[in-house]
Image (cartoon, coloured by chain):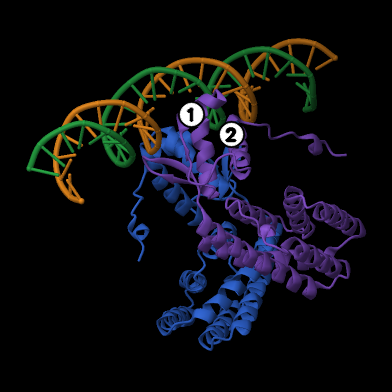
Chain colours: A blue, B purple, C green, D orange
Amino acid sequence: MSLDDLRLSDFKTMQQSVFEKLREAILAGHFRPGQRLVERELAQAMQISRTPIREALRKLEEEKLVTNIPYRGVFVSEVTAETAAEVYQVRMALEGLAAALAAEKAAPEDLALLRGIMVDLEKASEKGHLDELIEGNNRFHATIAKLAGNQVLREILQTLQANIGLLRVTSLSVPGRPEATLEEHWGIYEAIAAQDVTRARELAAEHVRRAGEAAGKELTKRGEEG
Amino acid sequence: MSLDDLRLSDFKTMQQSVFEKLREAILAGHFRPGQRLVERELAQAMQISRTPIREALRKLEEEKLVTNIPYRGVFVSEVTAETAAEVYQVRMALEGLAAALAAEKAAPEDLALLRGIMVDLEKASEKGHLDELIEGNNRFHATIAKLAGNQVLREILQTLQANIGLLRVTSLSVPGRPEATLEEHWGIYEAIAAQDVTRARELAAEHVRRAGEAAGKELTKRGEEG
DNA sequence: ATCAGGTATATTGTATACCGAACATGACAA
DNA sequence: TTGTCATGTTCGGTATACAATATACCTGAT
């Protein structure tokens, strides 16, 4: 072990806390896409000055969770259907890569972890709890990304996930999609467990493709309604 | 022509200019990895206040071009060999995707553009100009990313390119690598021109894999020397 | 009623001054 | 070598002010 490994480095600055709080709030849907975020209001609400607020907003801007228009303000980003499609296209490649890498390194305890998530997902599916389904779904993918052991890949996937999260549209709302998702997840799990790299990649990519298709359907539907 | 087309919308705020200037300076190697960037010095050098400097630094931080350590300062990021390997792994998947998409949409004028870049590259190769080789190389990949027609993909590739650019190590320094690169590029070009999606993907991925291998070799070599 | 033009107001972008906290450094002692 | 202390530097954050810009409203002319 190298000495560099015990460096502790970071604790929390205001700016970091604000960044995380806002990020969380946006992703939780507490702020809606298109909504304006006024610096003074945020500052007053958090009982701090404008400076750390602005710095946090700049970081969110770089992450594309908000959009800044000079002298007008920052707004929660509005993701278009086109962008969503692009994100799914990229995710196909990257989730495929993640699953392939996970299959390569699959350790027994990792598999147990993944299996545990799947069990939870099945329960949620039986009960029909959409929130739990979404949560479990995210955990499944996040876990694979983690098992892949590639930090760069993991962070990119997180960012992409956050971006489509802005849509507040889930493919799981499409009839039959929760069941199909379960099945596809099991397939990916099996491939990883069998250390079948190629199949893991293919199944993961195909899974994302279908999810994207369903999300697209749901999107256009909401577009017609609302 | 619609009136909307002459909307100017964005002009430059200080913060944006600073962001771009710093980014450019870092990537050009004007600041070295590990070098500290002192807010006051930058502010004085640019004849502005600390405020826009700090905001620009936060954006660079989010892009991982600099690293901030609370109460110590921001430093130009130092990319490790491990991170570089991770980046190449992700790039394999994404350059593959980009080439595949480019192959799908290949229009005659796009092919002419790519071919033009290749011609320049051959000239640079004959003359042995390393700088031009690097420049042309980047242009080749950037063009394919553009032809892919996926903005999300394009931006991610740009960021990844910037990150390994921090290494200031080029695979093209490895003996025989410039020639091999030319050959691989031609292969990718031919596949795109033939609209052979699968082959374009495979060749592009393989090309990145080899470049990464070469870069890794060059990295460890420099590690032993310096 | 419509629209050009002006005006008032709000918000952002930037500058400045200031403070405490954390860190770096070097001297010094044990 | 280790620990302690004093000192200076820089950062993180606050407060305030002001310029630039956007927005909404109002007015009067047509």
- The quarter holding residue A8 reads bottom left
Under tag 1, what secondary structure?
helix
Which residue is drawn at the image coordinates 70% and 64% (left, top)? B95
- Residue tagged by mark 1? B41
Left or right: where D4 falls relative to B147: left
Q: What mark, if any, has residue B149 been given in the picture? A: none
Rendered view: B91 above or below A182: above
Which residue is drawn at the image coordinates 54% and 85% (left, top)? A186
Number of dots carrying numbers = 2
Which residue is drawn at the image coordinates 54% and 26% (left, top)? B45
How far apart are the alpha carbons under marks 2 and 1? 13 Å
Residue B63 is situated, as x and y percent measured from the top left of the image, at: 55, 49
Rendered view: B133 above or below A175: above
Classify mark 1: residues with Cα within 10 Å, few (<14), some (14-19) or many (20+): few
Does residue A165 appear anywhere in the picture? Answer: no
Residue A69 is situated, as x and y percent measured from the top left of the image, at: 62, 37
| Subunit that carries the residue with mark 1 | B
| Residues at discs 2 and 1 both on one chain | yes
Pair 2/1: label in front: 1
Under tag 2, what secondary structure?
helix
Which three-letter amino acid code belongs to the residue tagged 1? Glu
Rendered view: D3 above or below B151: above
Q: Residue furthest front?
A: B225
- The quarter holding residue A209 reads bottom right
Which three-letter amino acid code belongs to the residue tagged 2? Val
Looking at the rendered image, the quarter that the N terminus of chain B falls into is: top right
Left or right: where A103 falls relative to A14: right
Q: What mark, if any, has residue B18 been given in the picture? A: 2
Of marks 2 and 1, which one's residue comes earlier in the chain? 2
Q: Nearer the viewer, residue A165 or B152?
A: B152
